[in-house]
Image (cartoon, rainbow, N blue to C red):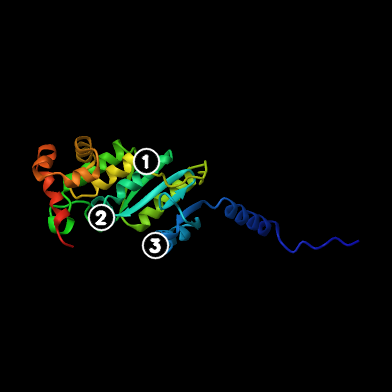
C-alpha cells in the first residue's frame, strides 16, 4: 500500500498549527448589547479580541472576572445629575472586581469653570470621584478616547485568568432604600439630607405635607426645592 503524499511542508504545518493556537487563546470580552454599535466594540475586534454581545444587568463590559462601567465625560456628568450613576455603583457592589472608565478626557474637560456648559460645580465632580473610589471602592480609569479604552480592555483581557460567573441579578432595594431614593430624587437632596428628613418626618407623605418653616428647621435653605410640589407642569 502506497503512503499518502504529504502535500504540506513542515513549516506550513507549523504555521497552521500556530494560527490555530492563537485563535484558541483569543481573549474574550463580553459586551452589553447597548454597546453593540460603539466604536469601542469595533476597536476591540480589530485588536484581535473575541467580542461576545450579551444583555448585561451590571456594567457595559466584562473581562474575565472584572465588570467595567464605561462613561464618556458628558455621560458621567449627566449621570451624576440624574443620579443614575449612584444606582449603577450600588449594583456593582455585587461583584468583587470592578472598574469605572471615564472616556474622552482628550476631547472634553472633566471639569471646567464654564458653569453654563458643565452645569456641575467642579468640586462636586471631585467629591463624586472621591466617593466612587473611597465609599463605593470602584477604581477609576481616565482614557483619552475610544481607542485608549479598547486598549485598556484588551490588555486587561490578556492579564486576567479567572472568568466571572454571570449568575447575578439586579439588586432590589428594600423599603427604606426605596423611600430614601425617592426623596433623593429632588435636586440638591443627597443621602444625608434625605436621612435627616426621614428621621424627622418618618414618611414621604409627611415630608410633602410639612410646612416650609418646619422643613427649613430641618434642612435649611434646601427646603426651597419642595416648593416644586405646588408648581404646575
Query: Looking at the rendering, in which quadrant would you find the C terminus?
Result: bottom left
Classify 53 as above or below 128: below
Disc nearer the start of the sequence (3/1) = 3
**Mark 3 secondary-structure assignment:** loop
- For the point 30% across and 51% down, which residue is it? 84
- Residue 164 on image: x %, y %: 50, 44
- Tell me if mark 2 has few (under 14), some (14-19) or many (20+) residues whose alpha carbon lies within 10 angstroms of its own: some
Distance CA(mark 3)–CA(mark 1): 35 Å
**Mark 2 secondary-structure assignment:** helix
Q: Name the residue under label 2.
A: 78
Foreground mark, 3 or 2?
A: 2
- Residue 56 on image: x %, y %: 45, 53
**Mark 1 secondary-structure assignment:** loop
Classify 41 as above or below 163: below
Q: Nearer the viewer, residue 175 or 48?
A: 175
Disc nearer the start of the sequence (2/1) = 2
- For the point 34% across and 44% down, which residue is it? 89
- Tell me if mark 3 has few (under 14), some (14-19) or many (20+) residues whose alpha carbon lies within 10 angstroms of its own: few
Q: Nearer the viewer, residue 226 or 114?
A: 226
Q: Mark 1 points at which residue?
A: 174
Q: Is residue 164 rendered to the left or right of residue 228?
A: right
Q: Nearer the viewer, residue 195 or 52?
A: 195
- Residue 38, numbered circle: 3
Disc nearer the start of the sequence (3/2) = 3
Classify 120 as above or below 136: below
Q: Do the residues labelled 3 and 1 touch (CB within 8 Å)?
A: no
Q: Are marks 3 and 2 in contact (CB under 8 Å)?
A: no
Distance CA(mark 3)–CA(mark 2): 19 Å
Q: Is residue 112 rendered to the left or right of residue 63?
A: left
Q: Is residue 68 rendered to the left or right of residue 226?
A: right
Amino acid at each position: 500500500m502506497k503512503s499518502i503524499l504529504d502535500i504540506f511542508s513542515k513549516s506550513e504545518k507549523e504555521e497552521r498549527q500556530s494560527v490555530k493556537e492563537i485563535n484558541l487563546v483569543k481573549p474574550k470580552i463580553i459586551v452589553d448589547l447597548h454597546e453593540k454599535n460603539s466604536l469601542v466594540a469595533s476597536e476591540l475586534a480589530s485588536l484581535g479580541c473575541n467580542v461576545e454581545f450579551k444583555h448585561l444587568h451590571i456594567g457595559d463590559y466584562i473581562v474575565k472576572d472584572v465588570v467595567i462601567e464605561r462613561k464618556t465625560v458628558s455621560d458621567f456628568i449627566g449621570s451624576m445629575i440624574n443620579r443614575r450613576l449612584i444606582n449603577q455603583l450600588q449594583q456593582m457592589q455585587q461583584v468583587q472586581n470592578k472598574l469605572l472608565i471615564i472616556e474622552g478626557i482628550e476631547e472634553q474637560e472633566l471639569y471646567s469653570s464654564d458653569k453654563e456648559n458643565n452645569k456641575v460645580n467642579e468640586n462636586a465632580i471631585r467629591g463624586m470621584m472621591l466617593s466612587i473610589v473611597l465609599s463605593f471602592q470602584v477604581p477609576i480609569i481616565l482614557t483619552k478616547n475610544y481607542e485608549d479604552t479598547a486598549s485598556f480592555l484588551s490588555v486587561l483581557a490578556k492579564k486576567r485568568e479567572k472568568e466571572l460567573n454571570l449568575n447575578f441579578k439586579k439588586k432590589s432595594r428594600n423599603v427604606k432604600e426605596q423611600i430614601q431614593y425617592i426623596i433623593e430624587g429632588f435636586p440638591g437632596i443627597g443621602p444625608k439630607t434625605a436621612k435627616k428628613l426621614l428621621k424627622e418626618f418618618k414618611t414621604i407623605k409627611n415630608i410633602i405635607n410639612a410646612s416650609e418653616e418646619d422643613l427649613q428647621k430641618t434642612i435649611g435653605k434646601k427646603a426651597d426645592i419642595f416648593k416644586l410640589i405646588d408648581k404646575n407642569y
